[in-house]
Image (cartoon, rainbow, N blue to C red):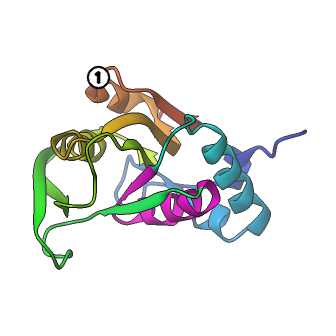
């Protein structure tokens, strides 16, 4: 089967949101039903057998993660910014280029022994994904893979993710 070149479906906008940034706009891929289906299919194909939970960090992880969970008949768990989840949560803070951020999950969203895949649109510096890994492991889950649509390889985000399996469909230097 010939696979669509998904990189051709991403719009690149130079100097957005500020000079020197090369923004990878996935809205063009999301607006193309065949490309979106292809991206979800390729991401699902990378999921290890036995996975029973997909975790999607806010907000674009929700797009890919919920579709993957549906296709794989897995549970879907949200990883959100503070104050967005209505029940008891666990949280992790992580460093950004200029400051910190925090992500949280419901304390009962992952069970001991769950086989978990984290999915997002982008691997950049790896901070959000590393914090999500820590939350899942704190709750007793096992992260079996991290799968992203895009990886900005020059930012070396996968280095922050340790020995976890990391897969990305599209790579850009930055």
* Residue 87 visible, this angle: yes
**At 11% from the left edge and 57% from the top edge, which residue is drawn?**
90
* Residue 100 visible, this angle: no
Total labels: the figure holds 1
Q: Is residue 167 left or right of residue 143?
A: right
Figure quadrant of the N terminus:
top right
Q: Is residue 126 or residue 96 the one in the foreground?
A: 126
In the image, residue 135 sits, relative to residue 27, either above or below, namely: above
Quickly name the residue at label 1: 162
Figure quadrant of the C terminus:
top left
User: Residue at the right extreme?
Assistant: 1
Count neighbours of disc 1 (C-alpha within 10 A) and say few if under 14, some if 14 to 19, many if 20 or more: few
User: Residue at the bottom extreme?
Assistant: 86
Place of residue 152 in the rendered image (x, y in percent of width and height, measured from the top left): 45, 37
**At 58% from the left edge and 67% from the top edge, which residue is drawn?**
27
The quadrant holding residue 26 is: bottom right
The quadrant holding residue 171 is: top right
Residue 54 falls within the magenta-colored stretch? yes
Segment tinted magenta in the rendering? 53-72
Q: Is residue 22 or residue 99 the one in the foreground?
A: 99
Place of residue 55 in the rendered image (x, y in percent of width and height, measured from the top left): 38, 54
Q: Is residue 49 or residue 56 the one in the foreground?
A: 49
**At 25% from the left edge and 65% from the top edge, which residue is drawn?**
80
Place of residue 85 in the rendered image (x, y in percent of width and height, measured from the top left): 20, 74
Q: Secondary structure at mark 1?
A: loop
């Amino acid at each position: 089967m010939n696979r669509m070149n998904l990189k051709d479906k991403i719009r690149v906008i130079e100097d957005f949101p500020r000079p020197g940034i090369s923004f990878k706009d996935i809205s063009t891929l999301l607006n193309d039903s065949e490309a979106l289906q292809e991206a979800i299919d390729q991401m699902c194909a990378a999921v290890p057998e036995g996975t029973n939970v997909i975790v999607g960090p806010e907000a674009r992880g929700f797009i890919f993660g919920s579709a993957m969970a549906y296709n794989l008949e897995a549970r879907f768990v949200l990883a959100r910014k503070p104050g967005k989840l209505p029940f008891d949560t666990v949280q992790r803070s992580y460093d950004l280029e200029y400051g910190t951020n925090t992500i949280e999950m419901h304390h009962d969203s992952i069970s001991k022994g769950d086989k978990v895949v984290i999915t997002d649109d982008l691997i950049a510096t790896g901070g959000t994904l590393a914090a999500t890994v820590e939350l899942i492991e704190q709750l007793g889950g096992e992260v079996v893979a991290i799968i992203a649509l895009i990886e900005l390889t020059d930012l070396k985000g996968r280095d922050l993710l340790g020995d976890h399996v990391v897969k990305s469909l599209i790579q850009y230097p930055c």
